[in-house]
Structure formats: structure tokens, C-alpha cells
């Protein structure tokens, strides 16, 4: 386990044809030349052209590292896409502390990387994931969780060379397609700045004194289990029951990432379709079952507040709409859609394997994120849903209605549940131990 604070390489923009921004204050390149002010970086066949407005000089290079030369410096990048492929996707101008690396690979565009110490990075992550007005106990619990996940991922990647991802090749004979996704897609940097890894928006989001205090008070504090830092996952709302790690990623048991009830009382795991149907039409007394606008405004950033039906939700598609959607998202022509059939569920009710039956092709798809991607223009809130099919007089499906529970993969810390726990007076260590059973809280530096 680590004994000192690491620096992180955070991917902000990747494979852009052109990057524009501003260096506020003096920065130095690798040769000691001073760089400052507005800049534009344009991809070329074997590198990129970098022009600073202040001196008009043009540099042709495959890469450059720009390091702050003073205390009051910052980096501004324009047109940063946030919420990539999610329903809140948009572009922002964002500001960052630390150093900036620009690099490219032939024919791949420009990648912008922010190099920053871990604890400074976390100030932004917590402010980006949570509202700065959230309760202090929640901010501290989230800091411990985010810090643990990140360093566990880095240590594991260093040991194994990569984090595994399964993908069954797609061909005309494929009848089952099982995929899961982790940060191993990022070979140029440690972690991306979007929801794929952890939401990081630099100093664009206001970093309040409460957030800064939460980071400082938990500095170097991690969740540990069995002599290792915990792979501490999190998401928005579990829907009442959290999920098993193996049902969302690789097939291995993680002792502190088992399914639990998001409550001080127990809820039985989902073991049948009838039980799941009752579950999604019920309103159990889970911590994340809240419509308290005051709590949600404290916890959710402004664009996340656009989603209000996170605990129980409904999505309706006509058969034709869903056929078109499946073709666009999967690239597979199913023909006339006949049925969506859950093959395997986890204890939270999340579907691990879903059979899609069509007149031309039938495929079983998993795991939960791939299911969510196929069944929504962006991402379905979760894979914890039941399907009600309305048929015409001839038995042909006319409409599919999905009734669901929760928002996200459901493994580990439930952000809205943790927020309610904090409001109810639970301390940060009580919150993380509720979601990560058997883990200990330990300061490592």
C-alpha cells in the first residue's frame, strides 16, 4: 500500500482535432521557455501545431508539458465535453490547477492531460460529484470512497499491466454478448475526467471551505481490507438494495462489495421475476428513497437535479422505436422485436443477462452497463427493471414499458442514500462501513 501522496494524470480532452485555451499566469515548457495567455493547438499528420497569441510563435511538436512557474496560475480549456454519451452531455469551458500536457498520436488528434496531486484532484471530484453545500459527513465519506477507488485502481493496474475487460466477439453466429467496462481504455493517462471514471471538472465547480476541510480532515484516509486498499465503487441511487461486484464487472467475489439493504432493516434479495415485479412497484423505506428537495439540492450538482425519478422510474417505447434504438446502439438487426426476457438477475434486481428476441435474430446481452446502453439513447438509469409488453390482436408487440429501480450500477456507496444518512446524523466512518461491510478506515499518509 502507498505511504505518500501520488500525482495523477487526468485526461480532460481526448483525440480532439483542435484544442483552445488560456494559460493564466506563467508556465514553462521542457526547455524552460515561458508560455502564457491564449493558445490554439491544431492536429497535424505527425503531431500538432501550437500557437500562443502572446508571441505568435508556432511550434510543431508531438507533445509538450507546461508546468506552472508561479503560485497563482491556472489552465482554461474550452469546449470540454462532460457527461459523454449520457443524457446530460454538454460542453463547458473549464479551469484547472496544476500542469498541462498536450500530446498526440498519428491520426488520433490531440489529448490534453492535467497533472495534479491526488488531494487537490479530490477537491474537484467531490465538488463535481456532490454539491458543495452537502453535509460534511457525506463529503468526508465520499472523499474516502473516491480516494480508495482511485488508488486501488492504480495499484492494480501497475501490478497486472491493465484492468481486464471481457468482450465476446460479435459475428453472425453470436448468441451471447457479455461486456463490462473499466478504466483500462485509458492508456495515455491514469483516469479520465468524466463519469466513466470519476467526474472531475477542475476549479470550474466552486470548491467551498466545507469541501476543502473534508479533504484535509480525511487526507490520506482509505478503506482497507485484507491488507489492500478497497476498490470502493459508487453511483447515484441503489433503489433499495445494492449489487454484487461480479454482476457488473469481472467474475470475482469482492468481500466488501456484496449486496446489502440500503436501510437499518433488511430487505430480502430478489430471487424471482414475481418478487422483482413487486419490488419495482413498491416504495421500501431505504435511505435513498427520498424526495426531500432540500437534501437533493445539497447533494446533486445542477444538471443531476434534472433527474428526479431515480428511485422508481418508467420508460415507454413503441415496438418500432425500440427496434430502431437497438439497431443504432448495438449494430444488430433483430427484425421484428418479439420480447425482452431477463435471463439472470443479481440480488438488487439488476439484470445481468437479458435475452432480446427478434424475428431475424436472438441475442443474450450483458452485463448491466451494456444492457443500459442498448436500451436508451444515452444510458438507461439502471438494469433493475421489469418489462410489460402490450400486444395487438394478433399477438404482435405494440409497446414495451420498463418499470425500474435505482440510478447506476448499484455496487458500493449509494450517493443519495449516503446523503440521507449524513442528514440523519451518521458520521463519515459509519456511512462508509455501512456500504463497504468488513472494510476498515485507515490513514496511510
Image: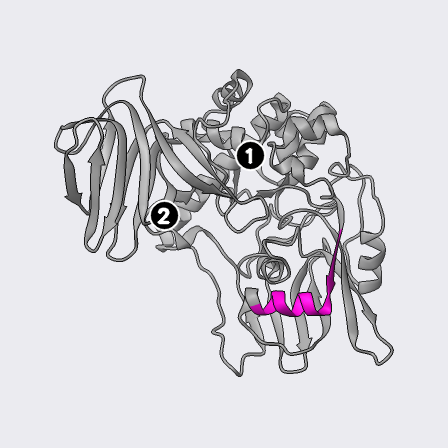
Residue 192 position within the rendered picture, expressed as x and y whole percent measured from the top left: 42, 44
* Residue at image coords 60%, 53%: 379
Assess whether residue 90 is covered by the magenta stretch.
no
Q: Report the magenta residues as a range.
A: 314-327
Secondary structure that dominates the magenta span: helix
Residue 172 position within the rendered picture, expressed as x and y whole percent measured from the top left: 52, 82
* Residue at image coords 15%, 40%: 59
Quarter location, residue 374: bottom right
Please name the residue that numbered disc 2 is placed on. Answer: 14
Asked if disc 1 and disc 2 are in contact, CB closer than 8 Å, the reply is no
Please name the residue that numbered disc 1 is placed on. Answer: 129
Image mark for residue 359:
none
Could you tell me which quadrant the C terminus lies in?
top left
Q: In the shown orientation, is residue 358 left or right of residue 230?
A: right
Quarter location, residue 316: bottom right
Residue 368 position within the rendered picture, expressed as x and y whole percent measured from the top left: 61, 59
Q: Which of marks 1 and 2 is in front?
A: 2
Residue 213 position within the rendered picture, expressed as x and y whole percent measured from the top left: 51, 18
Q: Mark 1 or mark 2, which has the lower sequence index? A: 2
Q: Is residue 242 above or below residue 121?
A: below
Q: Residues within 10 Å of mark 1 (few under 14, many from 20)?
A: many
Q: In the shown orientation, is residue 260 left or right of residue 277?
A: left
* Residue at image coords 63%, 32%: 300
Q: In the shown orientation, is residue 390 left or right of residue 416?
A: right
Which type of secondary structure does the marked residue at label 2 adopt?
A: strand
On the question of residue 228 being in view, the answer is no
Assess whether residue 325 is covered by the magenta stretch.
yes
Amino acid at each position: 500500500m502507498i505511504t505518500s501522496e501520488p500525482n495523477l494524470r487526468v485526461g480532460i480532452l481526448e483525440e480532439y482535432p483542435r484544442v483552445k485555451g488560456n494559460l493564466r499566469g506563467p508556465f514553462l515548457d521542457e526547455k524552460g521557455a515561458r508560455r502564457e495567455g491564449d493558445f490554439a493547438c491544431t492536429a497535424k499528420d505527425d503531431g500538432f501545431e501550437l500557437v500562443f497569441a502572446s508571441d505568435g510563435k508556432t511550434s510543431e511538436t508531438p507533445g509538450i508539458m507546461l508546468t506552472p512557474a508561479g503560485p497563482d496560475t491556472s489552465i482554461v480549456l474550452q469546449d470540454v465535453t462532460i457527461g459523454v454519451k449520457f443524457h446530460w452531455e454538454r460542453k463547458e469551458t473549464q479551469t484547472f490547477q496544476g500542469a498541462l500536457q498536450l500530446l498526440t498520436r498519428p491520426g488520433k488528434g490531440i489529448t490534453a492531460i492535467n497533472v495534479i496531486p491526488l488531494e487537490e484532484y479530490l477537491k474537484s471530484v467531490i465538488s463535481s460529484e456532490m454539491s458543495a453545500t452537502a453535509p460534511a459527513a457525506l463529503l468526508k465519506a465520499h472523499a474516502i470512497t473516491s480516494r480508495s477507488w482511485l488508488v486501488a485502481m492504480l495499484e492494480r493496474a501497475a501490478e497486472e499491466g491493465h484492468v481486464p475487460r471481457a468482450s465476446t466477439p460479435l459475428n453472425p453466429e453470436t448468441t451471447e454478448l457479455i461486456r463490462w467496462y473499466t478504466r483500462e481504455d485509458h492508456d495515455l493517462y491514469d483516469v479520465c475526467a468524466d463519469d466513466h471514471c470519476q467526474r472531475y471538472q477542475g476549479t470550474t465547480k466552486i470548491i467551498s471551505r466545507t469541501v476543502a476541510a473534508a479533504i484535509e480532515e480525511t487526507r490520506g484516509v482509505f478503506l482497507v481490507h485484507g491488507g489492500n486498499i478497497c476498490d470502493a465503487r459508487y453511483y447515484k441511487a441503489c433503489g433499495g438494495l445494492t449489487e454484487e461486484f461480479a454482476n457488473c464487472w469481472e467474475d470475482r467475489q469482492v468481500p466488501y462489495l456484496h449486496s446489502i439493504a440500503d436501510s437499518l432493516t433488511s430487505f430480502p434479495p430478489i430471487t424471482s421475476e414475481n418478487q422483482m415485479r413487486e419490488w419495482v412497484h413498491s416504495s421500501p423505506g431505504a435511505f435513498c428513497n427520498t424526495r426531500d428537495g432540500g437534501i437533493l439540492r445539497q447533494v446533486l450538482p445542477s444538471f443531476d437535479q434534472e433527474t428526479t425519478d431515480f428511485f422508481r422510474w418508467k420508460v415507454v417505447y413503441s415496438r418500432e422505436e425500440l427496434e430502431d434504438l437497438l439497431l443504432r446502439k448495438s449494430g444488430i438487426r433483430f427484425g421484428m422485436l418479439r420480447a425482452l426476457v431477463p435471463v439472470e438477475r443479481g440480488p438488487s434486481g439488476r439484470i445481468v443477462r437479458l435475452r432480446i428476441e427478434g424475428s431475424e435474430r436472438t441475442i443474450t446481452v450483458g452485463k448491466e452497463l451494456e444492457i443500459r446502453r442498448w436500451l436508451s439513447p444515452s444510458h438507461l438509469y439502471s438494469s433493475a427493471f421489469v418489462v410489460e409488453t402490450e400486444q395487438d390482436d394478433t399477438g404482435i408487440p405494440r409497446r414495451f414499458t420498463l418499470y425500474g429501480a435505482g440510478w447506476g450500477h448499484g455496487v458500493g456507496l449509494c450517493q443519495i442514500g449516503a446523503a440521507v444518512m449524513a442528514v440523519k446524523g451518521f458520521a463519515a466512518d459509519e456511512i462508509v462501513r455501512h456500504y463497504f461491510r468488513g472494510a476498515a478506515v485507515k490513514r496511510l499518509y
